[in-house]
Amino acid sequence: MRNIITIMKKEFARFFGDRRMIAMMLMPGVLIYIVYSFMGTAMTSMFHPDEGHAPVVYAVNMPDSVAPRLQSAGMSIERIGADEVAEVKERIAQSEADLCVVFPPDFDESVAAYDAQTSPGYAPNIEVYFNSMAPNSQSAYMTFTYILDEYESELANKFDINRGIEDADRAAPEDISTSIISSMMPLLLLVFLFSGCMALAPESIAGEKERGTLATLLVSPLGRSELAAGKMLSLAVLSFLTGLVTALATMLSLPKLFSGSGEVIVTNIYTAMDYILLSCVILSTILLIIAVLSIASAFARTVKEANMAITPLMILVMLVGVTGMFGGTQEDIAFYLIPLYNSVQSMSGVFALDYSAMNIVAASLSNFVYACAGGFVLTKMFNSEKIMFSR
């Protein structure tokens, strides 16, 4: 154990003694926070109307029955003639006007005389022109159609739905949050963890192999299994720190990102047990990834060659991570024995607050077993003179 700790201290000293390596660890999280925050601000400006904006409705033949309803909703009415409609429509297309509405002549009389069963032809038609890409115009259109729908229901009110009921929607705000987070975070976490491991493993093994320092360690009294364990554990700790920084930055930036689309992000919806199970999954996943990347790096003769061998694995990880966006989590424990896929399913379940603790424990233990198998293979590779001293 003392030799393993010695190797880990050596790896930590090499990492934390290099400011560039520390910057590499912090950079993904900082960039994600900045990008997501910027995207949230951009989405707010794209989809939200200007604060305090009073929409103006340019109306032809505005009936007296509708005008008060629009004014009570804070909408201004500008009465125009039919010959001015084309000009207003062009202004709407240029985002210089909000809404143009053309009522048929004698709208109130036509509505009162119309009967769906006996009246020939179509019901009175209202033309509404708006710009869906202009937030102010889109908001004015939604408000106008809502008012007209209410007015229409009052004209033929045969029954009501949910009158006086304010809690008809039983979906809690946290249900929205968990649905959003559970679909995105497994992919993001898996990619971040793999990226962190990818930045460290080739340099630690293939890099030392390229510089010749690994050969010195191999001919020392240090056991090959101790060297493999020390390398894997130190890389796992450093990768976990990288993933932790990135995950925290992502969680902090999600409220800013989704505030632009009107979604609700609720904090403090996860319990201590949820975080414990999630940590177990993340740690076991890191060990598995480190084992795989360490083996790939041990085969390579240079850092460049190791990165080339690892790149296809990144694509595989992204494909597996995307599966968390489709459907709910699996219930069969057999799915939690599949490497990487079990991690995605476990993360999705924890974030969605819909999981079986037994399945998550099975996923974590299976990942740990696979990592131990990888450590055994890495030890065998360290014992191979052909692999370690190839040029």
Image: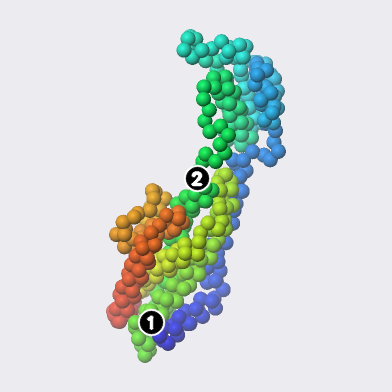
Closer to the camera in the image, 136 or 112? 112
Q: Amino acid at mark 2?
A: Ala
Q: Residue at x 38, y 79 (%)?
A: 229
Quadrant of residue 346 in the image?
bottom left
Q: How many marks?
A: 2
Quadrant of residue 99 in the image?
top right
Instruction: Establish if 257 lies above or below 295.
Output: above
Closer to the camera in the image, 169 or 98? 169
x, y percent for residue 69: 66, 25
Q: Which mark is residue 171?
A: 2
Quadrant of residue 137 in the image?
top right
Closer to the camera in the image, 260 or 172? 172
Relative horizontal placement of residue 356, taking residue 272 as reference (left or right) = left
Q: Is residue 366 visible?
A: yes
Instruction: Establish if 374 lies above or below 102.
Output: below
Return the residue at label 1: 227
x, y percent for residue 107: 61, 14
Q: Amino acid at mark 1?
A: Leu
In what element is the residue under mark 2? loop
Dot 2 or dot 1, earlier in sequence: 2
x, y percent for residue 247: 51, 62
Colouring method of the image? rainbow
In which quadrant of the rendered image does the C terminus lie?
bottom left
Q: Residue at x 36, y 90 (%)?
A: 221
In what element is the residue under mark 1? helix
